[in-house]
């Protein structure tokens, strides 16, 4: 059903690492961030495509936003509503239906990622050093959050660190924290 997607493959590898799912969901719920765009910021850099300009990030966000709002977000709302059951509907039926909605939501995320990959910078530099790729990812996250005027709290920075460290498992967690401190200076 879905075309091959290097971004989706990257996401499946990163999202399953310890702490990433709760970090992504916390940032989604607290700052209204799109998890796909958080991971896209990391993938673009990890794949050697470099740092995104504000204009490029805005184009990616704007291309993703309608699908996220009208399809994935709507499915997420239904799934979350079903979590505690619905009056008048047997709990087991609501739970089974919730699983089906979750599968559709994940498929919707997959569609969003294939679409995002299609607007990613095409040129990847395989010789780009790992440390530069990490800096690019941190810069991409800063650009994305900056578009929405988000200034992450220390807890939210820790969540970003969890995601960044998972995207670059060869990096020292302390070095990831330093990078984030550089792109999100505390005043």
Image (cartoon, rainbow, N blue to C red):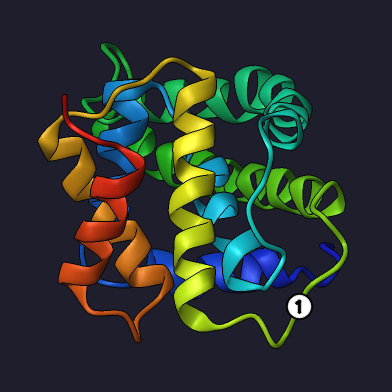
**In terms of secondary structure, where does tag 1 sit?**
loop
Quadrant of the snapshot with the N terminus: bottom right
Inspect this view and state whether residue 12 appears: no
Residue ID at (61%, 43%): 104
Q: Quadrant of residue 65?
A: top right
Residue ID at (41%, 30%): 79
Residue closer to the observer: 135 or 113: 135
Residue ID at (76%, 68%): 5
The image shows residue 54 at horizontal and vertical percentages of 66, 30
Quadrant of the snapshot with the C terminus: top left
The image shows residue 37 at horizontal and vertical percentages of 57, 42
Q: Quadrant of residue 69?
A: top right
Image height check: is 174 above or below 153? below
Q: Which residue is mark 1?
A: 125
Horizontal side, residue 118 vs residue 175: left or right: right
The image shows residue 155 at horizontal and vertical percentages of 12, 38
| Label total for image | 1
The image shows residue 20 at horizontal and vertical percentages of 30, 59
Image height check: is 133 above or below 88? below
């Amino acid at each position: 059903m879905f075309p091959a997607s290097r971004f989706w493959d990257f996401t499946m590898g990163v999202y399953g690492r310890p702490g990433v799912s709760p970090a992504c969901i916390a940032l989604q719920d607290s700052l209204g961030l799109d998890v796909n765009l958080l991971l896209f910021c990391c993938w673009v850099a990890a794949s050697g495509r470099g740092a995104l300009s504000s204009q490029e990030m805005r184009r990616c966000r704007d291309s993703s936003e309608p699908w996220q709002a009208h399809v994935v977000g709507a499915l997420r709302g239904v799934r979350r509503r079903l979590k505690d059951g619905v009056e008048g509907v047997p709990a087991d039926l609501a739970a089974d239906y919730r699983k089906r909605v979750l599968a559709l939501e994940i498929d919707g995320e997959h569609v969003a990622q294939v679409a995002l990959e299609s607007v990613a910078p095409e040129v990847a530099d395989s010789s780009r050093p790992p440390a530069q790729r990490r800096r690019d990812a941190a810069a991409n996250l800063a650009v994305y959050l900056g578009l929405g005027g988000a200034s992450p709290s220390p807890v939210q920075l820790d969540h970003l660190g969890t995601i960044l460290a998972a995207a670059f498992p060869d990096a020292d967690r302390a070095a990831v924290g330093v990078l984030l401190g550089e792109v999100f200076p505390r005043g």
